[in-house]
């Protein structure tokens, strides 16, 4: 972009110079955890206002201290600990899109926010990219070819270029919907869903600008950012510079105990994602790591890889959020599992 100035630069500078220094009187007063969502009486399976309490009790304080090394811990195929919340949340990949055409709600569209809420999916996983002229848009792929009537990377197009296009359904037919901006998502989803956003390559370098938008929309309670462990230093620098990163704002993706310990020490997060092997999601090492993170008081997310038997093992190990491209299938599984466990708990 050379010397071109982002349209958000002035806002970002003002934000850093003023809002961040008033965090104790402004951001902290208005901040609510992203997990504390408003109740919606319209939908029977809607997001619960008790999610924040669920988050606070997700770690099991009564459980014994973990072993010194997670790799030396014994493999224990235990039943769910009843002192821990057994509620499992669903993070719908790109909002859920299996019936995108009949729902008239393409993936990563504003229309799909309503659909995600109506289906009872707690979290709307989404993707943020940056346009050539410095706006943030909701696009998943490296190019817009599959998702829209246009071609090429979003980063090489201006916002006006994208807004002149239409989003496609997954069968490639054209919808009436347009590419959404981050601003539009935050407005449409406020008080309705929690967004779990992935920052596409290079976008983490503009995280201060993104947070300026989040604060401007008073949306600190409506979005968290899933980020790789390798970027921990970058986000620590942002926080040191005054960007208002709360303990609920970042979900780091980790693969071992050392990474869990480092993230806990530096960020004291509420949630963490334990990376799982797609071909063997419930190997003993992964299950031990999930238990370890849970013992540390962290709310653990994993991808819903493998079979339903694998999912059950992951739940028993402590997973309380599943990221999935099949949210309805996961929803049905969790309902069956709850009924089965209730039956097993019934005295004979």
Image (cartoon, rainbow, N blue to C red):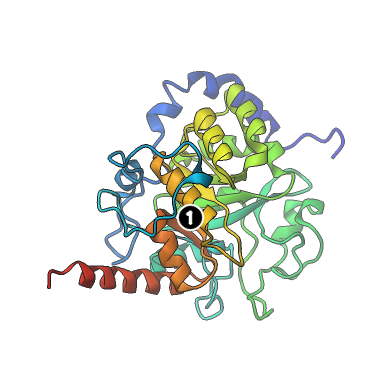
- Looking at the image, which residue is at 35% across and 46% down? 58
Question: Does any portion of residue 89 appear in the rendered image?
Answer: no
Q: Which residue is mark 1?
A: 287
Instruction: Answer with left or right where residue 229 lies relative to residue 311.
Output: right
Between 202 and 144, which is closer to the camera in this rendering? 202
User: Residue 211: image x %, image y %?
Assistant: 58, 36
Between 238 and 64, which is closer to the camera in this rendering? 64
Task: Give the quarter of the figure containing the C terminus.
Answer: bottom left
Question: Does any portion of residue 66 appear in the rendered image?
Answer: yes
Secondary structure of the residue carrying numbered label 1: helix
User: Residue 15: image x %, image y %?
Assistant: 59, 26
- Looking at the image, which residue is at 67% across and 58% down? 139
Task: Give the quarter of the figure containing the N terminus.
Answer: top right
Instruction: Answer with left or right where residue 139 lies relative to residue 261.
Output: right
172 above or below 259? below
Task: Decide: few, some or many residues near mark 1? Use Cα within 10 Å; few <14, some 14-19, many ≥20.
Answer: many
Between 22 and 58, which is closer to the camera in this rendering? 58
Residue 33 is drawn in which quadrant? top left
Residue 340 is drawn in which quadrant? bottom left
Instruction: Answer with left or right where residue 38 lies relative to residue 291.
Output: left
Residue 116 is drawn in which quadrant? bottom left
């Amino acid at each position: 972009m050379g010397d071109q100035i982002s349209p958000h630069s002035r806002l970002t500078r003002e934000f850093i110079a003023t809002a961040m220094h008033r965090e104790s009187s402004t951001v902290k007063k208005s901040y609510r955890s992203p997990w504390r969502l408003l109740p919606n009486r319209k939908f029977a399976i809607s997001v619960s206002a008790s999610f924040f309490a669920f988050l606070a009790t997700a770690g099991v304080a009564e459980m014994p201290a973990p072993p010194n090394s997670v790799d030396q811990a014994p493999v224990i195929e235990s039943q769910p600990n009843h002192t821990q919340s057994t509620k499992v949340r669903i993070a719908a990949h790109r909002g859920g899109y299996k019936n995108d055409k009949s729902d008239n709600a393409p993936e990563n569209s504003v229309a799909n926010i309503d659909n995600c809420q109506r289906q009872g999916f707690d979290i709307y996983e989404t993707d943020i990219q940056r346009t050539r002229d410095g706006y943030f848009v909701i696009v998943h792929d490296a190019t817009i070819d599959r998702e829209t009537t246009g071609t090429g990377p979003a980063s090489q197009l201006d916002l006006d270029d994208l807004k002149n296009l239409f989003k496609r359904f997954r069968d490639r037919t054209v919808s009436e919907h347009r590419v959404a901006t981050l601003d539009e998502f935050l407005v449409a989803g406020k008080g309705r869903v929690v967004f779990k956003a992935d920052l596409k390559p290079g976008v983490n370098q503009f995280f201060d600008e993104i947070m300026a938008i989040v604060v401007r929309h008073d949306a600190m309670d409506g979005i968290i950012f899933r980020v790789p462990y390798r970027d921990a230093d970058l986000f620590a620098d942002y926080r040191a510079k005054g960007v208002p990163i709360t303990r609920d704002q970042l979900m780091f993706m980790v693969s071992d105990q050392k990474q869990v310990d480092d993230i806990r020490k530096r960020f004291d997060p509420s949630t963490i994602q334990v990376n799982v092997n797609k071909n063997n999601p419930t190997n003993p090492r992964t299950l031990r790591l999930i238990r370890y993170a849970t013992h540390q008081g962290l709310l653990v997310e994993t991808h819903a890889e493998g079979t339903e038997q694998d999912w059950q093992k992951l739940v028993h190990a402590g997973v309380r959020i599943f990221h999935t491209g099949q949210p309805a299938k996961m929803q049905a599984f969790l309902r069956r599992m709850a009924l089965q466990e209730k039956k097993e708990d019934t005295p004979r």
